[in-house]
Image: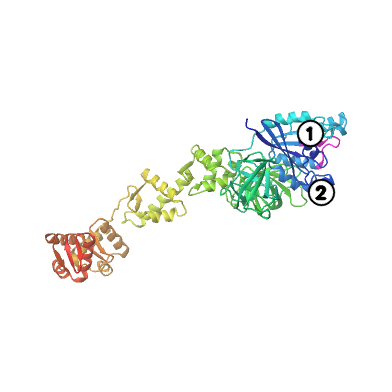
């Protein structure tokens, strides 16, 4: 039977018996520091575990209750699946009880048990009164229908009942995502003699194996997993939901700290700016645009400023107890993925003011006229298809798997599968994945059509625009696969025709005006009359008294039609004259001809004879051998 792993976290005011409760349940003292034992208070995170059944193992995270150590509490609260809200039966609710509860609610914890501790110090009436106060305080929250039990860590009263509640609640908890990317926020770093650097944390998703390469974010340094322990036992792998100790090679203790995260290499990017949906606590003061705040996300803490997107769009600032879309701009990099929960605390004094959920971890800085709402609303409440469609719509030339994975937190395989079911999303390429919105494809296609129409209007005598020039001007930043897909789509839709290296609007024909036809005939007669002694173009064309731009266009048209023949860059002959000379050479097939003999045959000077012979050599009409040619 595969064992389920969940994390149980404690919360509550200082000296309300959280550590004693965990010790009574597990037999493990979670206070690790000498100072904690001397002072009798929990200062930092403590850890324990309990096998409730063959199919359920609980990992406990015991948090400090003193207001000075809320930041340590926050470093351990992010991975909690099931909350034990500890309220001393002889004292009832206290300030840190309320703040811890607010934090856990804002972090999205969905299940919990209310534990009335120190029941041996209160009579039945007091226990019942405290129970009623707690029920009133948690009304409307995830703890509204949670079971409540009075216990005593000293006498053992209520512990068996609590274990039964833990078993039932633990089995009902939705397990963490074992099939996703491996991600372990670091909450402890230490060195062990004979082992080296060890980090610990709760594996929030995926699976980690011994000997796997990992990346440390923020920063991007690489290390290798030398060995793994789960709850003190060596293991070949760790799965989501387990408290895990990782012995690393390639990374020293000085390079690691609480707040960093181990992830699979090459997938994610740290950020100093992300869009989010923020919920303000009713007790918070009105939040000012650009207010400095302390951000807690995962095990990381940093400072930054919160910008109210509604305020930038001209809407009133969110009132306490309400919610809003915001952008967080931070002083330091953090690793944030869509769906990650965070807590905001006032810059000074340090009190919790709200929390929220990361929507877009790689958001750009918004301008006043930006229409950010469709994207953020889809990322907040939309379906998976809505989210993918809106993300793809942000990219005018499509988006690859690398960018989408970093911005969505979904695997490339998941994205590829979802794309096929998402209206408005086009799969340009599957390996490597490239997606685009139908809107982006349509807009890019229209730009190409507009560019070709403008080219035809400006160059009525040219059959088409160079395809590469159009792609470069209209689709410059686009991946090659996107540009190729778009051109193929326009051709298959019979909107564009490709002739060699030229592109033109489908059905486009060269239609000359009367004066253009007259100029064309004039130029053709002039070349025909000049025969094989046409002067160089730079000398000849000005003598025709045709507008220079029109003259060049007509020249190109006659060359494409084959009525004129370019022998060198500056020598062009009437094709009939060259064909006549070729016929004159036919009776000499198999014989040699010298340059003087060719000059006499063609009736031209050496100035024309040499270029014509070189042209015939390329056309395999003649073959040079020394100073003579053999007629083929």
Distance, label 1 to label 2, CA atoms, is: 27 Å
Q: Toward the viewer: 430 or 442?
A: 430
Q: Which residue is mark 2?
A: 35
- Asked whether, in this view, residue 119 is left or right of residue 176, the answer is right
Label 1 crowd (10 A; few <14 / some 14-19 / many >=20): many
Q: Earlier in the sequence, mark 1 or mark 2?
A: 2
Count the numbered circles shown: 2
Q: Identify the image quadrant of residue 529.
A: bottom left
Q: Secondary structure under badge 2? A: helix
Give the vertical position of 379 relative to 537 (above or below).
above
Tell me the quadrant of the picture where the C terminus can be found: bottom left
- Asked whether, in this view, residue 528 is left or right of residue 430, the answer is left
Q: Identify the image quadrant of residue 121.
A: top right
Q: Which residue is mark 1?
A: 115
Question: Which residue of the protein is positioned furthest toward the left in this rendering?
Answer: 587
Magenta stretch: give its range: 85-95
Residue 250 in the image, given as x and y percentages of width and height:
62, 53
Q: Nearer the viewer, mark 1 or mark 2?
A: 2
Q: Secondary structure under badge 1? A: strand
Q: Report if the CB atoms under discs 1 and 2 are less than 8 Å apart.
A: no
Q: Toward the viewer: 111 or 527?
A: 111
Give the vertical position of 566 relative to 475 (above or below).
below
Residue 387 in the image, given as x and y percentages of width and height:
56, 41
Label 2 crowd (10 A; few <14 / some 14-19 / many >=20): few
Camera sees residue 314: no
Residue 83 in the image, given as x and y percentages of width and height:
73, 36
What mark, if any, has residue 244 been given in the picture?
none
Question: Which residue of the protein is positioned furthest toward the front in this rendering?
Answer: 194
Give the vertical position of 518 relative to 243 (above or below).
below
Residue 138 in the image, given as x and y percentages of width and height:
76, 35
């Amino acid at each position: 039977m595969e064992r389920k792993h969940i994390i149980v976290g404690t919360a509550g005011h200082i000296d309300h018996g959280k550590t004693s409760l965990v010790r009574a349940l597990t037999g493990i003292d979670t206070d690790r520091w000498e100072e904690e034992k001397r002072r009798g208070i929990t200062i930092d995170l403590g850890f324990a575990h309990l096998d409730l059944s063959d199919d359920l193992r609980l990992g406990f995270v015991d948090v400090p209750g003193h207001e000075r150590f809320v930041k340590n509490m926050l470093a351990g609260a992010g991975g909690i699946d099931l909350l034990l809200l500890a309220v001393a039966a002889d004292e009832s609710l206290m300030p840190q009880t309320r703040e811890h509860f607010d934090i856990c609610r804002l972090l999205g914890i969905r299940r919990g048990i209310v534990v009335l501790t120190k029941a041996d110090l209160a009579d039945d009436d007091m226990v019942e009164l405290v129970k009623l106060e707690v029920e009133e305080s948690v009304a409307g929250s995830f703890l509204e229908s949670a079971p409540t039990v009075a216990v005593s860590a000293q006498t053992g009263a209520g512990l068996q009942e609590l274990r039964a509640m833990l078993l039932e609640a633990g089995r009902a908890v939705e397990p963490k995502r074992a099939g996703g990317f491996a991600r372990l926020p670091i909450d402890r770093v230490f060195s062990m003699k004979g082992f080296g650097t060890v980090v610990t944390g709760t594996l929030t998703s995926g699976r980690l194996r011994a000997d796997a390469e990992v990346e440390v974010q923020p920063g991007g340094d690489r290390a290798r997993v030398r060995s793994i322990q789960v709850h003190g036992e060596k293991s070949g792998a760790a799965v989501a939901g387990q408290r895990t100790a990782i012995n690393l090679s390639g990374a020293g203790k000085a390079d690691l700290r609480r707040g960093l995260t181990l992830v699979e290499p090459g997938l994610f990017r740290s950020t100093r700016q992300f869009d989010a949906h923020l919920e303000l606590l009713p007790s918070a003061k009105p939040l000012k645009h650009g207010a400095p705040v302390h951000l807690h996300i995962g095990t990381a803490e940093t400072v930054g400023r919160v910008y109210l997107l509604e305020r930038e769009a001209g809407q009133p600032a969110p009132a306490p107890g309400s919610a809003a879309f915001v952008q967080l701009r931070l002083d330091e990099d953090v690793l944030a993925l869509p769906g990650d929960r965070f807590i905001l605390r006032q810059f000074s004094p340090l009190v919790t003011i709200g929390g929220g959920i990361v929507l877009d971890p790689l958001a750009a800085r918004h301008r006043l006229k930006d229409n950010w709402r469709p994207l953020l609303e889809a990322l907040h409440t939309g379906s998976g298809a809505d989210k993918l469609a809106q993300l793809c719509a942000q990219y005018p030339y499509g988006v690859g798997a690398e960018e989408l994975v970093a911005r969505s937190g979904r695997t490339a395989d998941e994205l590829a599968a979802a794309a096929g079911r998402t209206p408005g999303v086009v799969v340009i390429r599957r390996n490597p994945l490239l997606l685009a919105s139908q809107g982006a494809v349509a807009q890019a296609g229209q730009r190409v059509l507009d560019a070709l129409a403008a080219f035809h209007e400006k160059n009525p005598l040219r059959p088409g625009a160079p395809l590469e020039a159009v792609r470069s001007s209209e689709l410059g930043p686009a991946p090659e696969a996107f540009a190729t897909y778009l051109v193929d789509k326009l051709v298959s839709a019979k909107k564009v025709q490709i002739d060699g290296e030229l592109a033109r609007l489908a059905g486009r024909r060269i239609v000359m005006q009367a004066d253009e036809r007259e100029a064309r005939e004039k130029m053709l007669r002039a070349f025909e009359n000049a025969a094989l002694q046409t002067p160089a173009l730079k000398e000849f064309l000005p003598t025709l008294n045709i507008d220079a731009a029109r003259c060049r266009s007509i020249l190109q048209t006659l060359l494409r039609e084959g009525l004129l023949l370019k022998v060198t860059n500056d020598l062009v002959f009437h094709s009939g004259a060259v064909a006549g000379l070729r016929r004159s050479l036919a009776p000499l097939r198999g014989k040699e001809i010298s340059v003087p003999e060719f000059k006499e045959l063609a009736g031209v000077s050496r100035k024309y004879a040499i270029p014509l012979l070189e042209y015939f050599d390329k056309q395999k009409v003649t073959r040079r051998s020394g100073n003579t040619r053999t007629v083929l």
